[in-house]
Image (spheres, rainbow, N blue to C red):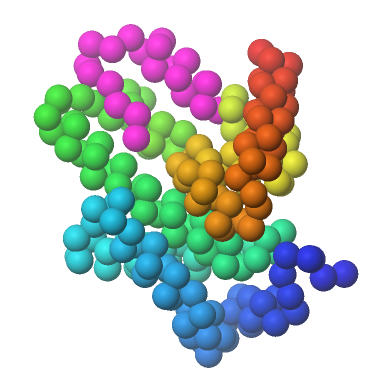
């Protein structure tokens, strides 16, 4: 049975891409490139021309790497949109974090234990920070992600768009076709369920 959020044409194109059909990849990127380049050019990022080119390339690479995990629970355009926004935010945070470290002399959290951590990405501490506090921060992030995994896909998507992608309700409404008031109520319910899961696992 076809998902109501996708159609047979999209599904077939994705399957052809995953099978290594270069023509299909060309069609795929042709259909989404305008949206990707438009997102990379949003004024709120403040990217210059070179940064826009770099982040556009990162978005395309992210789509290639992530497409195999796409489960057709949303439209392909939504899937690509989220990767594009996430890539832009990641680039912006790297630039901001690098500037702050240069100004303050702080040490990236992953340097405490000698290994990089995706959960610790973007975290930073001065050399005098309490290692136990840093560990608690990392555990909190892990607990939230575990609790998120217990929510339905709709709640996961909404929380991700609002807090991870940092989109406004108006942006989410435009992307999902849902009224802002409905999103506010839905998010409140999702956060209540998230809190319940966190308290149950405490």
Q: Position of residue 120 (x, y in %)?
A: 41, 31
For residue 147, say whether it is visible: no
Residue 124, above or below 160: above
Q: Position of residue 81 (x, y in %)?
A: 51, 61
Residue at figure coordinates x 58%, y 62% from the top left: 78
Residue at figure coordinates x 32%, y 23% from the top left: 112
Instruction: Please identify the residue farthest to the bottom as the structure is shown.
Output: 23
Q: Position of residue 72 (x, y in %)?
A: 70, 64
Does the magenta portion include 137?
yes
Q: Choose between 119 and 75: the one closer to the eye.
A: 75
Q: Looking at the figure, which quarter contains the C terminus? A: top right
- The residue range painted magenta reads 122-142
Residue at figure coordinates x 50%, y 68% from the top left: 64
Q: Position of residue 126 (x, y in %)?
A: 23, 18
Q: Is residue 142 left or right of residue 154?
A: left
Q: Choose between 169 and 46: the one closer to the eye.
A: 169
Residue 111, above or below 14: above
Residue 132, above or below 144: above
Q: Choose between 172 and 73: the one closer to the eye.
A: 172
Residue at figure coordinates x 55%, y 50% from the top left: 172
Q: Looking at the figure, which quarter contains the N terminus? A: bottom right
């Amino acid at each position: 049975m076809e998902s109501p959020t996708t159609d047979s044409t999209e599904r077939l194109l994705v399957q052809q891409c995953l099978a290594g059909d270069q023509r299909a990849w060309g069609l795929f990127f042709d259909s989404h490139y305008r949206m990707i380049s438009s997102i990379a050019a949003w004024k709120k990022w403040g990217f210059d021309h070179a940064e826009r080119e770099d982040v556009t390339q990162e978005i395309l690479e992210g789509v290639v790497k992530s497409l195999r995990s796409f489960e057709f629970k949303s439209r392909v355009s939504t899937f690509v949109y989220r990767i594009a926004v996430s890539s832009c935010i990641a680039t912006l945070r790297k630039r901001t974090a690098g500037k702050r470290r240069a100004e303050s002399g702080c040490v990236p959290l992953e340097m405490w234990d000698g290994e990089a951590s995706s959960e610790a990405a973007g975290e930073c501490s001065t050399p005098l920070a309490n290692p136990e506090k840093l560990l608690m921060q990392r555990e909190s992030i892990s607990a939230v992600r575990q609790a998120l995994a217990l929510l339905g896909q709709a709640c996961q998507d909404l929380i991700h768009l609002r807090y991870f992608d940092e989109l406004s309700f108006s942006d989410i409404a435009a992307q999902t076709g849902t009224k802002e008031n409905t999103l506010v109520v839905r998010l409140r319910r999702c956060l209540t369920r998230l809190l319940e899961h966190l308290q149950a696992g405490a």
